[in-house]
Amino acid sequence: MNTMNTKKLSEVCGLTARRLDQLTRENILPQKSKGEWPDADAVLKALFRHFHSRQLDEAKRRFDAARASREELKLALEQGNSIPTEDVIEAWSDVVLMMKSRLLSAGHNLESRGLITHDVRVLVDGEVTEALSELSKAISYRADAEQKSQTASKKKTAE
């Protein structure tokens, strides 16, 4: 059985003397005698058990939270309070295709009713095509912090 003082145990464990004393008061570590722990092996084993137990508790807590979240989502779907992502994507795709078709035919429809001239229709078709081209560009939904920061600073400058 080997002894270890607080300073040495702090260095070995990477914990402060204050934290070691707290763990002793909480009965996680054995009591020290005359400023030293009489059985360094027992102290280290107790520390490993304690931190391993905390890791298991944290993993169990995360697992339980994930399970609860999954059950909440499942219930929301069953009650009609949530919509599967695939259904939303399909519905929006249909809406976008319909809007694209309507916008592309707007100039022709207005010209065929005699409401605009052919030259104006060509201008309208060009503007609609350009707008649709801009809208079809990929959108990044996960902008990094730098992009968000730049956007925020541009808005402040514009104000």
Image (cartoon, helix red, strand yellow):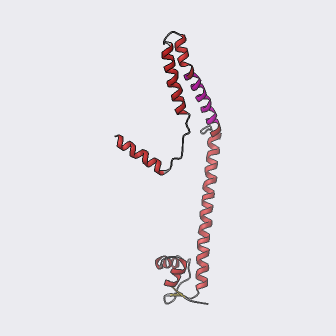
Say if the magenta span includes residue 93. Answer: yes
Q: Nearer the viewer, residue 19 or 81?
A: 19
Q: Residue 102 occupies which quadrant of the picture? A: top right
Q: Quadrant of the C terminus?
A: top left
Q: Nearer the viewer, residue 7 or 128?
A: 128
Say if the magenta span includes residue 110. Answer: no
The residue segment tinted magenta is 87-103
Q: What percent of the width, then of the height, locates residue 66?
A: 62, 54
Q: What percent of the width, then of the height, locates residue 149?
A: 43, 49
Write the residue at 53% across / 10% down: 113
- Residue 29 visible to an observer of this rendering: yes
Write the residue at 51% across / 29% down: 131
Quick check: 49 above or below 97? below
Q: What percent of the width, then of the height, locates residue 121?
A: 51, 17
Q: What percent of the width, then of the height, locates residue 82?
A: 60, 39
Please indicate whether residue 36 sits to the left or right of residue 1 in the image. left
Q: Residue 61 occupies which quadrant of the picture? A: bottom right
Write the residue at 64% across / 40% down: 77
Which secondary structure type mostly characterizes the magenta part of the structure? helix
Q: Nearer the viewer, residue 80 or 128?
A: 128
- Residue 84 visible to an observer of this rendering: no
Quick check: 80 above or below 118? below
Write the residue at 51% across / 18% down: 122
